[in-house]
């Protein structure tokens, strides 16, 4: 049955997208994986070698997702596409001009939608990987009485003008996700697309890399994984160091998020909805605890902190999204499994980097 589905996956080399690609292929879908450069495609071909010379997997390169008609060439397929999963959007946390986030996120989204309308009218459903950043108000105090409980009905209130006026990447990145997602919903509301839209809004995404052998050194890690490495595992840290405060407690395992994409790609009830994919709370202290358990050889490096103090402060915001489990059937992994599955990969990458530099 699934082989009748033909999927275009953008940003296919990303942390989340590689897990989506793996689960799509395992489920029997036929996929065209798109990335920004041939070198990224070559890495994907190594990771997915068993599918490379099969009708199930082919590849496309789109160097700049913001230019008009960027996706037109890769959207042409025989057999034609019926599903598009758009995960491509820049994410890193360093001070940059806001346009670095805003333009690729917004234009990349509207470009792929208009491309579908122009050259791939067979597409029945489009999934956009949005973010909790499109839901949360990062400018509000995270602590309140009663605590704020975010749901999929909430929207980040930052305007384009406010985002342009700041060089705080937390605010501009978050705005890029909400504005890109709004642009997608507006596109559909204006009747321009003949497809159903689905957006998925994960918070912090953690867990194992699909193929750690792709990563030459810790600096090449995706942002959320790199934060774990830099704050809790990098050389130079000591067990007596403090565990840094948690900025974002809400989290989900990357494999569960990938499953949510795969289910939402075809499930009729998933159409024209936002899906807040959130497993619960996870603190930096909890991560440190799990890393120390998983990596006894690193106990002199990983900060001990205060192992008992894993809970968030009283009044800190939370989340409620029972519909994701009920409708998409997602059973969330535990934080312990997620972090412990990642832990040995981080050590492997660190050793590889040390060996290549010596």
Image (tube, rainbow, N blue to C red):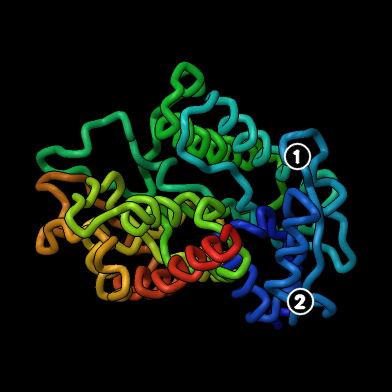
Name the image quarter holding the N terminus. bottom right
Question: How far from the left and from the top, in percent, is residue 216?
Answer: 60, 60
Q: Which residue appears at 28% of the width and 56% of the height? A: 320
Q: Which mark is residue 64?
A: 1
Q: How many marks?
A: 2
Secondary element type, mark 2: helix
Q: Nearer the viewer, residue 342 or 180?
A: 342
In the image, residue 194 sits, relative to residue 254, either above or below, namely: above
- Image quadrant in which you'd find residue 217: bottom right
N-term mark: 1 or 2: 2
**What residue is shown at x 25% (from left), y 68% (from top)?**
299
Residue 279: image x %, image y %?
A: 33, 64
Q: Is residue 286 left or right of residue 213?
A: left
| Mark-to-mark CA distance, 1 and 2 | 30 Å
Which is nearer the eye, 99 or 321? 99
Q: Residue furthest front?
A: 358
The residue that appears at 51% across and 39% down in the rendered structure is 177
Question: How busy is the neighbourhood of tag 2: few (under 14 within 10 Å), some, or many (20 plus)?
Answer: few
Q: Are marks 1 and 2 in contact (CB under 8 Å)?
A: no
Left or right, 184 with reference to 80: left
Within 10 Å of the Cα at label 1, are there few (<14), some (14-19), or many (20+) other Cα atoms? some
* Residue at x 67% of width, y 34% of height: 107
* Residue beneath disc 2: 4
Picture coordinates of residue 224, whole percent (x, y): 44, 52
**Would residue 206 be visible to someone looking at this image?**
yes
Name the secondary structure under disc 1: loop
Quick check: 237 left or right of 203? left
The percent coordinates of residue 4 (x first, y second) are 76, 76
Does residue 326 appear in the picture of this structure?
A: no
Most foreground residue, 69 or 213: 213
Q: Mark 1 against mark 2, which lies toward the viewer?
A: 1
Left or right relative to 168: residue 55 = right
């Amino acid at each position: 049955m699934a082989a009748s589905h033909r999927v275009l996956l953008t940003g296919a080399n990303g942390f989340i997208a590689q897990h989506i690609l793996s689960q799509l292929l395992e489920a029997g879908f036929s996929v065209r994986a798109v990335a920004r450069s041939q070198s990224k495609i070559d890495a994907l071909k190594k990771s997915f070698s068993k599918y490379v010379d099969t009708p199930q997997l082919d590849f496309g390169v789109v160097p700049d997702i913001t230019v008009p008609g960027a996706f037109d060439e890769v959207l042409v397929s025989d057999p034609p596409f019926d599903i598009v999963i758009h995960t491509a959007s820049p994410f890193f946390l360093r001070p940059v001009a806001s346009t670095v986030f805003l333009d690729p996120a917004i234009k990349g989204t509207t470009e792929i939608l208009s491309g579908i309308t122009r050259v791939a009218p067979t597409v029945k459903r489009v999934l956009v990987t949005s973010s909790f950043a499109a839901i949360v108000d990062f400018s509000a105090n995270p602590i309140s009485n009663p605590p704020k409980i975010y749901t999929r009905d909430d929207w980040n209130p930052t305007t384009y003008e406010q985002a342009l006026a700041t060089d705080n990447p937390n605010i501009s990145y978050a705005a890029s996700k909400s504005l890109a997602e709004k642009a997608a919903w507006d596109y559909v509301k204006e009747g321009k697309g003949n497809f159903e839209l689905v957006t998925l809004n994960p918070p912090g995404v953690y867990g194992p890399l699909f193929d750690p052998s792709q990563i030459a050194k810790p600096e090449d890690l995706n942002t959320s994984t790199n934060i774990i490495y830099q704050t809790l595992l990098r050389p130079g840290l000591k067990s007596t160091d403090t565990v840094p405060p948690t900025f974002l407690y809400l989290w989900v395992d990357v494999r569960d998020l990938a499953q949510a994409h795969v289910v939402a790609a075809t499930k009729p009830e998933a159409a024209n909805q936002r899906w807040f994919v959130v497993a619960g709370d996870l603190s930096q202290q909890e991560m440190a605890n799990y890393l120390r358990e998983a990596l006894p050889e690193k106990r002199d490096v990983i900060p001990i902190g205060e192992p008992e103090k894993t809970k968030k402060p009283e009044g800190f915001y939370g989340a409620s999204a029972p519909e994701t489990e009920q409708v998409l059937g997602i059973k969330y992994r535990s934080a312990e499994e997620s972090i412990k599955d990642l832990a040995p990969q981080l050590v492997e990458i660190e050793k590889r980097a040390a060996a290549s530099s010596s």
